[in-house]
Amino acid sequence: DVVLTQSPLSLPVTLGQPASISCRSSQSLVYTDGNIYLTWFQQRPGQSPRRLIYKISHRDSGVPDRFSGSGSGTDFTLKISRVEAEDVGVYYCMQGTHGPGTFGQGTKLEIK
Amino acid sequence: QVQMVQSGAEVKKPGASVKVSCKASGYTFSNFGISWVRLAPGQGLEWVGWISAYNGNTRYARKFQGRVSMTTDTSTSTAYMELRSLRSDDTAVFYCTRDVPVVAAPLFDYWGQGTLVTVSS
């Protein structure tokens, strides 16, 4: 089974500073159609998960452009260019290349 | 706009069953599927299973096989998840999320508000 490993698991960040979350897969996430189905979700306290980015780097509608995704093969990164208070929450990566969704452990972003 | 509205919180005793509903609106229900995802206390997100509202096909996570059933009612655009033989470690928030209609890479683009299932004697 594919395992996704996120780091760090806890991320204290100063408002206005950048933040970066890594997601590493135990297997290549290249699908038979050539796409890589790596998705990022944000879960704010008390809310449902929200899809932020799909297929590595495609931002969902309404997601601020301070969020960006990158990566290839087995290593992926979610970056926030300037953290705002509303970004507090848990961030999950998920792969959809090998079978149904498998999630990383989650990274808790908090304001320092 | 797409909305997924789930049924309310449930409290169950160990060994009982629970059935959670998810009513979708704002899109053609039978053109998509529904996945269910669990968030247990202190844990991360975990996929429970998927049902196609297009053809009724299902897939379940290995750890829930034999205890979970998913169904849809296309006349009311509602999906259901039943979990049987509940244990205390089944206590969690269950989310429905819009998914693909056939076996393919998952969508998970819209989510319900979550249903807290508490299992306690």
Image: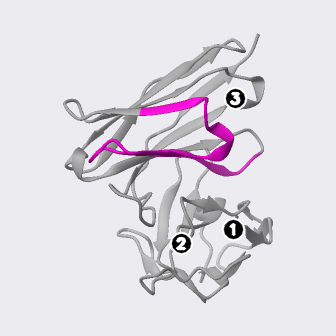
According to the picture, the residue beneath numbered tag 3 turns out to be: B91
Q: Where are the magenta residues, as a range?
A: B43-70
Q: Position of residue A91 (x, y in %)?
A: 64, 63
Residue at image coords 55%, 20%: B18
Residue at image coords 24%, 45%: B29
* Disc 3 + disc 2, Cβ < 8 Å: no
* Residue B10 visible to the viewer: yes
Going by the numbered disc 2, the residue's amino acid type is Thr
- Above or below, A56 relative to A86: below
Q: Are marks 1 and 3 on the same chain?
A: no
How far is mark 1 from mark 2, CA to CA?
9 Å
How far is mark 1 from mark 3, CA to CA?
25 Å
Name the image quarter holding residue B120. Answer: top right
Residue at image coords 44%, 57%: B108
How far is mark 3 from mark 2, CA to CA?
29 Å
Name the image quarter holding residue B105. Answer: bottom left
